[in-house]
Amino acid sequence: MAAFIESKQSGGGSSRMYTYDTLQEIATYLLERTELRPKVGIICGSGLGTLAEQLTDVDSFDYETIPHFPVSTVAGHVGRLVFGYLAGVPVMCMQGRFHHYEGYPLAKCAMPVRVMHLIGCTHLIATNAAGGANPKYRVGDIMLIKDHINLMGFAGNNPLQGPNDERFGPRFFGMANTYDPKLNQQAKVIARQIGIENELREGVYTCLGGPNFETVAEVKMLSMLGVDAIGMSTVHEIITARHCGMTCFAFSLITNMCTMSYEEEEEHCHDSIVGVGKNREKTLGEFVSRIVKHIHYEAKK
Ligand SMILES: O=P(O)(O)O[C@@H]1C[C@H](O)[C@@H](CO)O1
């Protein structure tokens, strides 16, 4: 088993293994085993996987059983792709994502987004657990992502590195308004409808490589750069989704406040981060269901 996981993790050592044909093979494998044809793909962050448990009439696939798929190695990431209905709308949901710190290249972490695209998803909803770097935030807040800073990209690490396949999208492309402003507007309306407007924020997310949490100096620096929440995912998934023309919506559940001074006891640990997700599962389920319903009915207009 260990050797099997290792082979899945190494992926041949190159992100170039995910050619168009390989990704099409994965999509076909799934499409031949489910009758659902989702237009919305959802990625569940740490502690947010219970969202997938709300789906009805499901067809689910353990990552181990899907050809060319990596495996999830992080607690709180079940490692299953679930097709089903959320609020009556067909969706596909990653119950567990892949992170760079697990040993996967960014292209591999983001690969399922291209599979979603080939399956027919026009929209991506990415969720994550993140630390609050904005001192006004509170644990349990939901931060709509309005923009990100691709710090790993600054260091030359990008999921789209390597030859570009125009069938996915152009070599060069812009990132303005990647996080759909209309969906963020609607999310604010939904937050009012379900009574969580006081816990809703909108801000800038950044992804660090992890797996360690940030030093006080790093948090100070990122905060000065305009970062409101710090995590270890999402950015490369969103870049990949944008590249292939998907509409993106993403939010962070603020599961801890980043350590901002040397006097503070650092309290955050993965278990408590997952625990915050669990505590918010009902609210987040309602929130995401309504977003999905909105996307579905807007598409029908
Ligand atoms: O998958 P996400 O980004 O929600 O996971 C966050 C970042 C780390 O993987 C983990 C730290 O507890 O949660």
Image (cartoon, rainbow, N blue to C red):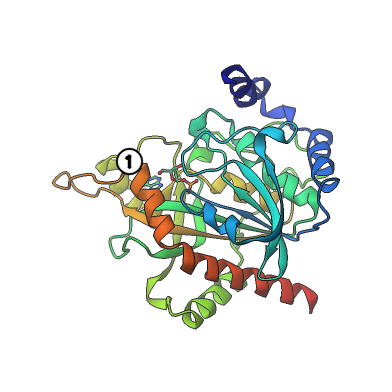
> In the rendered image of this protein, does residue 287 appear above or below residue 113?
below
The reply to whether residue 227 is in sight is: no
296 lies left or right of 285: right
> In the rendered image of this protein, does residue 191 appear above or below residue 53?
below
Q: Which residue is mark 1?
A: 214
Quadrant position of the N terminus in the picture: top right
Pinpoint residue 124: horizontal percent, then vertical percent: 65, 57
Pinpoint residue 289: horizontal percent, then vertical percent: 60, 69
Identify which residue is drawn at 76% across, 59% down.
38
Quadrant position of the C terminus in the picture: bottom right
Q: Quadrant of ligand 1?
A: top left
The reply to whether residue 234 is in sight is: yes
Nearest the camera: 54 or 177? 54
- Helix, strand or loop at label 1? It is loop
Q: How many marks?
A: 1
Residue type, label 1: Glu
State which quadrant residue 120 falls in: bottom right
Pinpoint residue 55: horizontal percent, then vertical percent: 64, 61
> In the rendered image of this protein, does residue 103 appear above or below residue 72?
above
Pinpoint residue 171: horizontal percent, then vertical percent: 73, 42
212 lies left or right of 90: left
Nearest the camera: 134 or 277? 277
Identify which residue is drawn at 37% across, 76% down.
198
* Residue farthest top in this picture: 3
Identify which residue is drawn at 46% across, 54% down.
205
